[in-house]
Image (cartoon, rainbow, N blue to C red):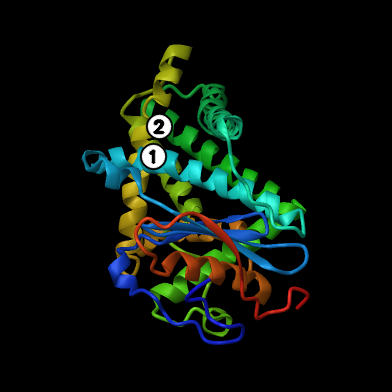
Amino acid sequence: MNGQPAAGSEAPRVCDPREMDLAVGGQAVIEGVMMRSPTAIATAVRTPDGRIVVRKQPFRSVFRRWRFLNVPVLRGGIHLIESMGLGIGALMFSADQAMTEERVETKKGFKDTALMWGTIVVAFVLSLGLFFYLPLVLTDLTGVRHGFGFNLIDGVIRIVMFVAYLMLISRMKDMARVFEYHGAEHMSIHAFEAHRDLTVDQTRPFTTLHPRCGTSFLFFVMLISVVVFSFLGRPDDVGQRLLRLAFVPVIGGLAYEAIKLSGRFRNAWFVRPLIWPGLMLQKITTSRPDDTQLEVGLAALRAVLEPEPEGFRTRTYDAPAAVPAEA
């Protein structure tokens, strides 16, 4: 690919972080990392034979196409749905690449797209049931009648269940690998935001914790839900419980705004106490990657930051691998 550094060479910083307006982010996938910028998405995956396969796609957010949707709070729910769709697509690509030594050119048809969005809907419904409806049922068993007290207990149960869920899945071998790539994603973004060259040596000193992480976003959802639900009082029947689900998009929107502000003002003294719990949760969802995993995260980041001609199309290629896969 044009513009890619040779193996072992220092990678030039291709974009000023300040010009990106905190718009570079990503997620861990199976044996890899997906990175997103305002104009592109790149997913880098380590294959069984040690290659790094990168798929780069043009990207134009729904907010750039319909600017009237870019309204505080409203944009949070829309961004969440958009991110889930992109994330599922990246996971499907990484699963294809991570399980074979042959490059797989994935072309998703209507059936695959329907399956992808069906997976999102099912996962979303299960999450609502587990982390929003079930805590209400358990809180109701306590017999607390006061609205604020009821919602406070409901919130505590929700947070405990969420932390227990994270700790449980962190013990799964496959998820442990994903959490290591999650750490590689965060460390790569830290290096970019600190104006460092995007190399393993320059990136290794950074922490795996980042204030704009999805884990921190979910913690803000849990916290803000206590405040929002307190205004609704104690639900007395199934209808009132289900009514709360209608406020989930509002809570997600508020959490989105909170996570953006916490990322922008992360060093402010009044923000640090708010982001600290989310960072502590990331000690569960991120782990220290090895150099081969860190290199995959950097490959995705370099790809997504490299300028492209207008109208470029999706392409899949092998990125230079300076670190042996067996290291």
Residue 138 position within the rendered picture, expressed as x and y whole percent measured from the top left: 57, 26
Residue with the mark numbered 2: 248
Residue 246 left/right relative to 219: left
Residue 69 left/right relative to 150: left
User: Which label was assigned to residue 290?
Assistant: none
Identified at 44% across, 28% down, the residue is 150
Quadrant for the C terminus, please: bottom right
Residue projecting furthest to the bottom: 9
Q: Which of the pair 124/167 is nearer the observer?
A: 124
Residue 130 position within the rendered picture, expressed as x and y whole percent measured from the top left: 58, 31
Residue with the mark numbered 1: 252
Q: Which of the pair 34/243 is nearer the observer?
A: 34
Identified at 59% across, 47% down, the residue is 163
Residue 268 visible, this angle: no
Please tell me whether mark 2 sits on a helix, a strand or a loop: helix
What's the amino acid at mark 1? Gly
Residue projecting furthest to the left: 68
Task: Relative to 213, say whether 306 is above or below.
Answer: below
Q: Is there CB contact under 8 Å for labels 2 and 1?
A: yes
Packing grade of label 1 (10 A; few <14, some 14-19, many >=20) is many
Identified at 41% across, 16% down, the residue is 240
Task: Relative to 191, say whether 39 is above or below.
Answer: above
Packing grade of label 2 (10 A; few <14, some 14-19, many >=20) is some
Please tell me whether mark 1 sits on a helix, a strand or a loop: helix
Residue 264 left/right relative to 41: left
